[in-house]
Amino acid sequence: MSKFVTEDTHGSLNFQLMMPAFSACCEELVSRWTQSLGSDGWCEVDVCPAFQTLTGDVISRTAFGSSYLEGRRIFELQSVQADRIVAEVKKIFIPGYMSLPTKKNRLMHQTNNEIESILRGLIEKRMQAMQQGESTKDDLLGLMLESNMRETDDKGQPILGMTIEEVIEECKLFYFAGSETTSVLLTWTMIVLAMHPEWQDRAREEVLGLFAKNKPEYDGFSKLKTVTMILYEVLRLYPPAVAFMRKTYKEIEIGSITYPAGVIIELPVLLIHHDPDIWGSDVHEFKPERFADGIAKASKDPGAFLPFGWGPRICIGQNFALLEAKMAVCMILQHFEFDLGPTYSHVPHNQKMLRPMHGAQIKLRAI
Ligand code: HEM
C-alpha cells in the first residue's frame, strides 16, 4: 500500500501546480510530431512508444521537478525490469527460484541497484538543497521529503515520517503504476478516435470551443464533457489493467461460496466491462454517450466500471491520470487530425497490460 498517499500528505497534491509539467511534456510531443511531418503535410507514427516517453516524462517532472532528465533513466530501467518480471511470471512457479544466482536474476538485481542508486542520488541532492532553503516542495519528491524531514526535525529520527527507503520504494511504485497505464489509455484513445472520425470531430469542436488554440487551462478541464465521456468509454472497452487480485485473510463468504483464508481471487475487469447483461447488447461498440449522465448511470450496475480498481486499494493516481490524459488529448486535437495508418491491425493483447499487439500506427496531419 502506498504509504505516502495514505498518510498525512494525502490530499495535499495540488493538481494545478502540476499543470505546467503536464503541458511542457505535451508541448514536446506536439513539437516532435510537427517536425516529423512530410512535405505532403502528413506523418505516420507508432503512438505506443511516443506515449510511453510522454507519460514517463510527466511522472519524472512531477516527481522530480527540474531533475526530470535523471528520472527518465529510472523509467527506462523500470520498463525493462517489468518485461523481465512478466517473462518470469509466465514460467512454472518454483518457490525460491528468483533468489537463485542465475544470469537473469543477477541482471535483475543489478538493474534494481542502478534504479535505487539514481533515486538515492536524487534524494540526497534534494535534501541538501532543502536544508539550505534552496528547494521548493512543489513536486512529489519534495512533498515526501518534507514529510520525512518534518518528523526527523521534531523527534530527532524518522518515526512517523517516511524513511529514505520508503521514499525510494514510493518513487518506484509511482513510475511503475503511473506511466505505462496512462500511456496505454492514450494509445487506445488515439486508435478509437481514428476509427471514429465523428467523435474525433466532436471532441475537437469541444476543445477548440473552450480553449481555441491556447494552452488548455486547469479550470476548463471540468467543462470537457465529450472528452471525458470518450476517455471513460476507452477505459471501459480497453482497461489497461484487465484484472486485479485479492487474497482472503480470513474465511469469507462471497455469493454462495465460502472461501478459506489465503485464497487468491481474481476480479476480471475486462469481462465485467464486456458483459452484455450489465452494459446492454451494444456492449462491444464504442458509444461514449452511455456516460452522458455520469459513471453510475452508464450501466445497470453502478459499480461495474472498474478501470482504477475498487475499495481501499483503489488507484490513488486516477485524477492525475485523467488530467494528464485530458491535457494530451486536448493538445493533440488542437494541432492534428488523424487516421489509422495502413499497417495498423486491431489486435488487443494482454501483455503486462492490454495493448495493441502490433503497435498503433497513426497518420497525422497538422491543422
Ligand atoms: C489510466 C491510468 C491508470 C490506471 C488504469 C490505473 C489502474 C490502477 C488499478 C486497477 C489499481 C489497483 C490495483 C489493485 O487493486 O490491485 C491501481 C493502483 C495504484 N495506482 Fe493506478 N492507474 C492509473 C494511473 C496511475 C497514476 C498516474 C499513478 C501515479 C501517479 C498511479 C498510482 C497508483 C498507485 C500508487 C497504486 C497503488 C495504490 C495502493 O495500493 O495503495 N496510477 N491503479
Image (cartoon, rainbow, N blue to C red):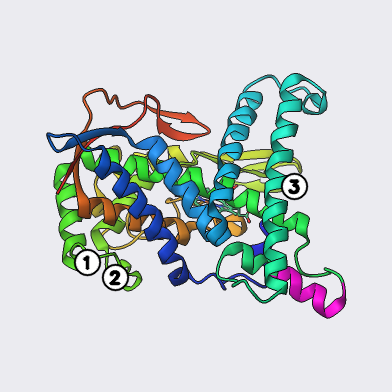
Q: Residue at x 41, y 36 (%)?
A: 49
| Marker disc for residue 220 | 2
If you read the primary sequence from the N terminus, does the residue marked by circle 3 or circle 2 appear first?
2
Question: For the magenta stretch, what is the residue range?
Answer: 146-156
Mark 2 element type = helix
As for residue 290 lying within the magenta part, the answer is no
Between tags 2 and 1, which lies in front?
1
What is the three-letter code of the residue carrying label 1?
Answer: Phe
Chief SS of the magenta region: helix
Q: Which residue is mark 1?
A: 211
Out of 322 and 119, give the one closest to the viewer.
Answer: 119
Q: Position of residue 228 (x, y in %)?
A: 31, 58
Q: Is there a contact, CB below 8 Å, between mark 2 and mark 1? A: yes
Q: Quadrant of residue 113?
A: top right
**Percent position (x, y) of residue 311?**
58, 57
Q: Which of marks 1 and 2 precedes in the sequence?
A: 1
Q: Residue at x 75, y 41 (%)?
A: 260
Disc 1/disc 3 C-alpha distance (Å): 54 Å
For image coordinates 81% across by 77% down, the residue present is: 153
Residue closest to the far right = 156
* Most foreground residue, 207 or 296: 207
Mark 3 lies on residue: 251
Q: Residue furthest bottom?
A: 154
What's the distance in space between the residues labelled 3 and 2, CA to CA? 48 Å
Residue 156: image location, x then y, percent: 87, 75
- Asked if the magenta segment contains residue 154, the reply would be yes
